[in-house]
Image: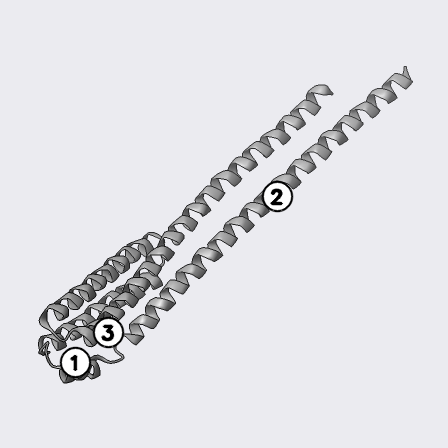
Amino acid sequence: MVGIVLLVLLINGAIGYFGLRYVDLKYAELMQRVNLLTEATDLSREAQVHFKVQVQEWKNLLLRGQDGHNLASYRDAMLAQASQVQEALRRLGVQSTVLKLDAEAALIAKLISDHQKMLAVYQKELQALPPDTFLNALKLDRAVRGIDRPLNNAIDQLAQRFKELAHAQRQAAAEQSQKTIETVRRVMMVGTALAVAVLMLMLGLVIRKNRGL
């Protein structure tokens, strides 16, 4: 009788141990994806910030680039920010591929291409701009006015998308772990109840046997 009860308790304990071990492993797996999505979110925000600074440097160029020195300075500052945008988007594309986010990876590839095309337009128009003529700066502004807005909106939406994905993955990880823990708890309760039932049955049989004697 004792052996049977001990066997049931051992099985119950093994279920609990391996169940909790499974919870730990599954949670670690889910959290790894959460961490990757968090890194992707940071990269999308990085691209977002550098792009906004790039636009601001372009405005500085139009407002203050009236001599050759200032024009070169603001142009270089703008191109430096553009390079940071490209790098952040490139790394984000790699991260999206690792995460198997095919739609996001395709969108990022398009953003990289669109950003390069926009830069080509900026540089083409800059080459035709005499640095000492304000009216030509106004003409330059008219030539490229608004071409940054679609890209700005797309990068903003991309950053929001990765933020939502990371948040959803955190919730999924917490909910999945809670469900698994609850399942293990129920199995252990059933096992404990079974052990008690076996013990009571055995005690009943022993009592009946002793009474029969």
Image location of residue 34, percent across then percent down: 43, 50
Image location of residue 92, percent across then percent down: 30, 57
User: Which quadrant of the rendered structure holds the C terminus?
Assistant: top right
Q: Which residue is mark 2?
A: 183
Along the line of sight, the residue nearer the viewer: 192 or 77: 77
Q: CA distance from mark 3 to mark 1?
A: 10 Å
The amino acid beneath tag 1 is: Ala
Image location of residue 163, percent across then percent down: 42, 60
What residue is drawn where x is 70% and y is 33%?
Answer: 192
What residue is drawn where x is 9% and y is 71%?
Answer: 68
Q: CA distance from mark 3 to mark 2?
A: 60 Å
- Asked which secondary structure carries label 1, the reply is helix
Q: Which residue is mark 3?
A: 59
Label 3–label 2 contact, CB within 8 A: no
Along the line of sight, the residue nearer the viewer: 58 or 42: 58
* Marker disc for residue 137: 1
Along the line of sight, the residue nearer the viewer: 203 or 78: 78
